Image (tube, grey):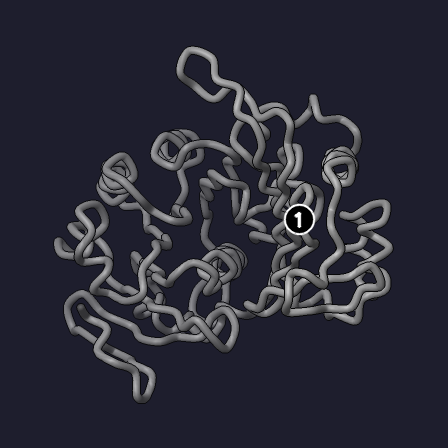
Amino acid sequence: MKNEKILSLLSGEIRKIFEKTALDGNCLQEIRLRSGKPLMVLSMGRELFLDQVGRAWSAAKQGYVVSKDEVTEALEHLSRYSMYAYEEDVRRGFLTVQGGHRVGLSGRCVIEKERIYGIRDISFLNIRIAHQIRGCAEPILPYVYRDGQLMNTLIVAPPGCGKTTVLRDLIRLVSDGNALADGQSVAVVDERSELGGCSQGVPQNDLGVRTDVLDGCPKAEGMLLMIRSMAPSVLAVDELAGEADKRALLTAFGCGVKVLATAHGAHLGDVRKREDIGSLWAEGYFSRCLVLEDQGGPGKLLAVFDREKGCLFRRKNAECLCG
């Protein structure tokens, strides 16, 4: 692999394996290190196991077995040998490292006063490779603007279909300005550090020149904070869920702030069934709902719905997506 950005995340024998592999780093989505288990990667949606010379196999028994010491070494390397600087991140179950890559952690939870105080004996790492795909949101721009005005838009797709990637690029395009409208100030509430990919508070991804990022804050609290403190024209949040998020969004709508958001779901019917965001759609707070495909790369539309006009676009041969 000739991708130095990915190789820089790795150390020791694991790095040597990736230096030898013929896998395309641009297609790599995840690297999973599990103590006592084979080295696994996710590439273009396919699980593969790498052996000691970097060959990729579909059978787990062919994979190089990762030791507990190698997991520890990898974690120390990823944290730049300063785990104390990431204590709060560890409490939340992940690190976001330089480059915007997110490292999920699992091991033994330390509980104090019925709350998670930290994670010890970390034995499992999931390095999720961040790929900022500039321009992937350009095809959807005509569906999020009307007469030069941004509409409240909900982007829906199952996990792993590029919702976050698309939202990230859409934020950049709205912030910098595009062929349909001038740039606007955007407030991003990045609860899990996936949109900005902040490392020590500094965004590693380009979210545009008029964008402010609140990193690591629960969405509901963060939305209210950003509305009060940063006076945005647009509020962007990833993966809406729960009544608290709904109440915060109602405040945003009431203040005249436009909203760009994502939510899990395979189609509009999934949105309608939810008690939280379903009512926001039913009552017309969101004007547009964009449903993404699970193939063809981020930004591929399966369907587009307008709250008043119904289905504006549906991919040929796609089943009914209204639920």
Q: Position of residue 83 (x, y in %)?
A: 71, 26
Query: Where on the picture, by quarter, is residue 220?
Result: top left
Q: Quadrant of the N terminus?
A: bottom right
Q: Which residue does the numbered mark 1 point to in the structure image?
A: 37
The residue positioned 40% from the left and 73% from the top of the image is 293
Element under label 1?
A: loop
18 or 90, nearer to the observer: 18
Residue 186 locus on image (x, y percent): 45, 47
Q: Is residue 13 above or below residue 106?
A: below
Numbered marks: total: 1
Residue furthest toward the top? 113
Q: In the displayed structure, would residue 210 be above or below residue 40?
A: above
For the point 79% across and 71% down, the residue is 22
Query: Badge 1, how many Cα within 10 Å: few under 14, some, many 20+?
Result: some
Hey, which quadrant is residue 21 in on the image? Answer: bottom right
260 relative position to 128: left or right: left
Q: Quadrant of the C terminus?
A: bottom left
Residue 18 position, x and y percent, is 80, 59
Give, as a three-letter code, the residue at label 1: Lys
Q: Is residue 186 above or below residue 46?
A: above
Q: Is residue 248 left or right of residue 32?
A: left
The reply, left or right, for residue 174 in relation to residue 322 is right
Q: Position of residue 224 (x, y in %)?
A: 34, 32
| Residue ID at (85%, 49%) | 13
Q: Residue furthest front?
A: 61
